[in-house]
Image (spheres, rainbow, N blue to C red):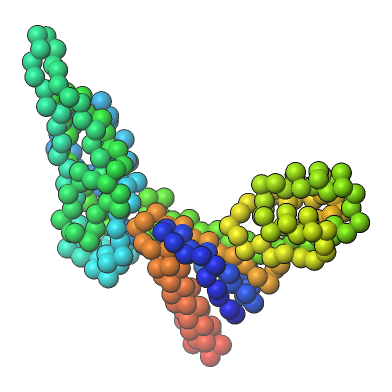
Amino acid sequence: MRIRILDKGGLTIRLLVENAPPGFVNAIRRLAESNVPVMAVDEVMFLENNSAMYDEILAHRLGLIPLTSEKALEKYKRPEECMAEPNQPECYTMLHLEAEAKAEECGEEKCGEPLIVYSGNLVSEDPDVKPVYDNMPIVYLAPGQKIALEARARLGYGKEHAKWMPGIAVSKYLPVIEYDARLVEDRNLEQCLKCISGGSREVIEALRSRGRGEIVLLEDINTSIYDYCEREACKGILRIRRDPGRLILKVESTGALPPERIVIEASKLLEERASLLLEELGKVLKGDEK
């Protein structure tokens, strides 16, 4: 097996995996989404809330705010370790929020400036666990409205709830374009070029040169345009196929963990599960099954 980084930047990483079974890459993909733990708000206690938004909706919004989790993986226990005693200090941290839109009496009504409360207004007891983004709106407060709350955040898994998903992961076979424009009429070639105008510039230039060959598409583009054009304007000129021996794995993080860390943690989980399976199989084959 060989792995190559196609591109990495910001919240996204794309890997080219060669000579690996599709099931292996798919296992990494599934574990990355459902079993790599991150921090998220799990419980909220409202001390005051006279806004127009119900407590339940506010709690749901707080849960969906991504929290920085890289250092938390070493500091906090996993959910299964905290089931018996969830109040251990190593099982959670607290975030606090208090905000008020000041108001003045204007006859029978209250007047003043409204206030939008953002994720950046959350104050965490652990500086390593805080909102990834400060500009996520939580609630709009009209003059005279106030909220005060305490939120408990813990590690969790995407298989429990989407708020604990560290990101999304997708895999696909490497797309390869086969083309032959040597004997194509000008009118048909122009129709084909018009059809794939939103695709790869490399493919367009290759067709314009009236050559023959194949192009491996390593770019992060939607290849469905080639499926359509192969059946319509580019019939007999262009064909797209997928190479089952080479797969592209793309991971896009919410910001809770760096994308490369998500891949590493998913790989560790797969290794642990494979080791456990081999251990149990060894017991069965030795006749030690209980």
Q: In which quarter of the image is residue 53?
A: top left
Question: In the figure, is residue 128 to the left or right of 12?
Answer: left
Can residue 246 be seen in the rendering of this structure?
yes
Instruction: Please give the name of the residue rendered at 89% of the width and 53% of the height, measured from the top-left corner.
Output: 184
Can residue 77 be seen in the rendering of this structure?
no
Choose between 267 and 68: the one closer to the eye. 68
For the view shown, which residue lies furthest in the top direction?
Answer: 107
Question: In the figure, is residue 104 to the left or right of 166?
Answer: left
Instruction: Please give the name of the residue rendered at 42% of the width and 58% of the height, measured from the top-left corner.
Output: 11
Percent from the top left, x then y, of residue 203? 72, 57
Q: In which quarter of the image is residue 190?
A: top right
Percent from the top left, x then y, of residue 255? 36, 56
- Work out which quarter of the rendered image holds the N terminus and state it: bottom right
Choose between 32 and 121: the one closer to the eye. 121
Percent from the top left, x then y, of residue 282? 52, 87
Report the number of numbered marks.
Answer: 0
